[in-house]
Image (cartoon, rainbow, N blue to C red):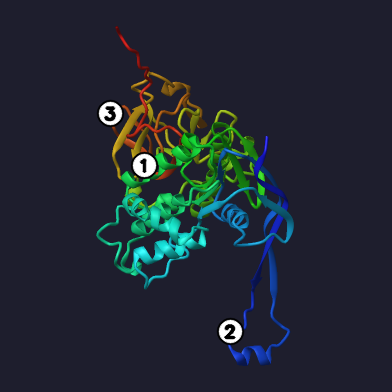
Amino acid sequence: MSYSIEVSNVSKKFRNYIDKQNTLKDKVLRFGKQTVKEDWILEEINLMINEGQTVGLVGRNGSGKSTLLKLMTKILYPDVGSIKINGRVSSLLELGAGFHPEFTGIENIYMNASILGLSKKEIDAKLNEIIAFSELHEYIHQPVRIYSSGMYMRLAFSVAISVDPDILLIDEVLAVGDSAFQNKCLEKIKELKGKGKTIVVVTHDNSMVEKICDRAVWINNGKVRADGSPRDIIMQYMAFLSEEENKRLIEDQKSESNEIPLNESPELWHIAKPIESSNHSRVGNKKIEILNVWFSDSQEQIKRNFNTGEQMIINIQYKINEKASSVVFGVGFFTSDNTYCYGTNTYIDRSIPSESLPNEGHIRFNISKLTLLPGVYKLDVAVHHENGEPYDYLTSVYSFQVSSDINDVGIFRLDHTWELKG
C-alpha cells in the first residue's frame, strides 16, 4: 500500500523571547543579553497516512496538531526529521489565509486558486462552480474585508476543494459558519473520501471524527499518545480529559474550602475541619453537624468530575453535638441554574434508623449508575428531624461536574430501548 504522507521522526521547536527588546535603545543597551527559551512543540512524530485514508488529529489546544498540519503543507519545516508528501495538496489551515482584504471575492478566488496550483484557464472553468458552492453570489464582487468569518470560511473551503486535491488538510475551520453550510462541507468531504482522496482533519468535534474518519491520532504535549480506530481513540481521549478536569476541580475546591486533602488516608477523614459556609447557604441548630462532604467513585477515589453511567458516592461526615431523635439525612440535586433534578432522604428510603447512629460517623449515598447528562450540578445536603426541624442544612455549598460522549439532551438519561413492532 502506498503512502500519501510519511512523517519520519519529526520534531519542531519555536523560540520564545522571554525578555524581548522592542526598541533600538533596548537593542543597544542590552546587546547580547536577550533571553531566549526554546520550546519543543513536536517531538519524534512518526506517522504514515495511507492513500485514500481519512485521519482525524485530536488533542487539547497547544498539543501540536496545527503545527503538524503546517509542516505537512510546508508552511513550516521540521528542525529534526522529514515529511514526504505524495500528491497535490490543498489546505484550509487558517481562516482567510492568503486572502487580501481589499480584493473582491472573485479576485481572491483567482489569487488563492493560483497559489494552490491552478492555471487561469482552469480557474475560469471552475469559477461558477466555486461561487455556487460558496453561496456568495451577492457579495462576490465586494471586498472580503466586509465578509463575516462564516463568509470567509465559505469562500476558502470552496476554493480549496475546487483544486481537486489528492490530499486535503483541514484545521478546525469547519467550526465556523452556519450548520447548513457545515453539513454541506461534510457531505463534500465524504464525496472526496469516496473518490479515494487522502484527508487529514484537525478538530475538537469528536462526533465529526467518528462520522468521517477511518482513523484517529491523539497528540498530547507534542507526542503521539495513541493511534487507532476513531471510537477507541475518542474514548481514551475523553477519559483523559475527564480525569484532567477532575484534578482541576479538586484543586479549585481545595483552594476555596477545607475539603479533605487528597494525600490523607480514609482513616484520617474523621479529623477534617468543620465546613465553613455563608449564612445564606447554611441553616440549622447544629444538634447534629455536617463536618464534611466529598464525592468518590467505586474505587474510593475522591472526584469532582464523573461520567454518565459511572458509579458515584456522596460521603457525608457528621458529628452529634446534642442528643437528637428521628434523624433524617437527605440530598438534593440541582442544575447550575437551580432547576431541581432530584431529592431523597433516609426517611423516604426507610434506611439508617436513628438509634444506630454513633456520635461521629460517615454516611454514604451510593448511586450505582449516574444518569445525569453533561453539565455542572449543585448539591444540597441536610440532616434534620422527621418533623422538619433543621439540624444542619447546606444549600449549594458543593458542586460536581458530569461529562459524557452521549448525545442525549436534557438533564438525565432514561434507561430505554427502541424496537420495531411489525
> What secondary structure is marked by label 3?
loop
Residue 343, given in percent of the width and then of the height, sits at 33, 30
- What crowding class fits label 2: few (fewer than 14 Cα within 10 Å), some (14-19), or many (20 or more)? few
- Disc 1 to disc 3, C-alpha distance: 58 Å
Asked if the residue under mark 3 is in contact with the one under mark 1, i.e. CB atoms within 8 Å, the reply is no
As shown in the figure, which amino acid type bears the numbered disc 3?
Asn
Mark 2: amino acid: Asn
Which residue position is annotated with label 2?
Answer: 22
Q: Identify the image quadrant of residue 34.
A: bottom right
Q: Earlier in the sequence, mark 1 or mark 2?
A: 2
Badge 2 vs badge 3, beta-carbon distance below 8 Å: no
Q: Which mark is residue 387?
A: 3
Q: State how far apart marks 2 and 3 are (Cα).
A: 72 Å
Q: Nearer the viewer, mark 1 or mark 3?
A: 1
Q: Distance between the residues labelled 1 and 2?
A: 46 Å
Q: Name the quadrant containing residue 28.
A: bottom right
Q: Position of residue 65 (x, y in %)?
A: 58, 52
Q: Alpha-carbon neighbours of circle 3 within 10 Å: few (<14), some, or many (≥20)? A: few
Viewer-closest of 231 and 147? 147
Observer-nearest residue: 163 or 336?
Answer: 163
Q: Earlier in the sequence, mark 2 or mark 3?
A: 2
What is the x, y in percent for residue 404? 46, 35
- Residue 30 is left or right of residue 357, and the answer is right
User: Residue under circle 1?
Assistant: 183
Residue 18, quarter of the rendered image: bottom right
For the N terminus, the quadrant is top right
* Near-viewer residue (299 or 412): 412
Q: Residue at x 44, y 58 (%)?
A: 121
- Looking at the image, tell me whether mark 1 or mark 3 is earlier in sequence order: 1
Amino acid under label 1? Asn
In this view of the protein, which residue sits in the foreground, 369 or 203? 203
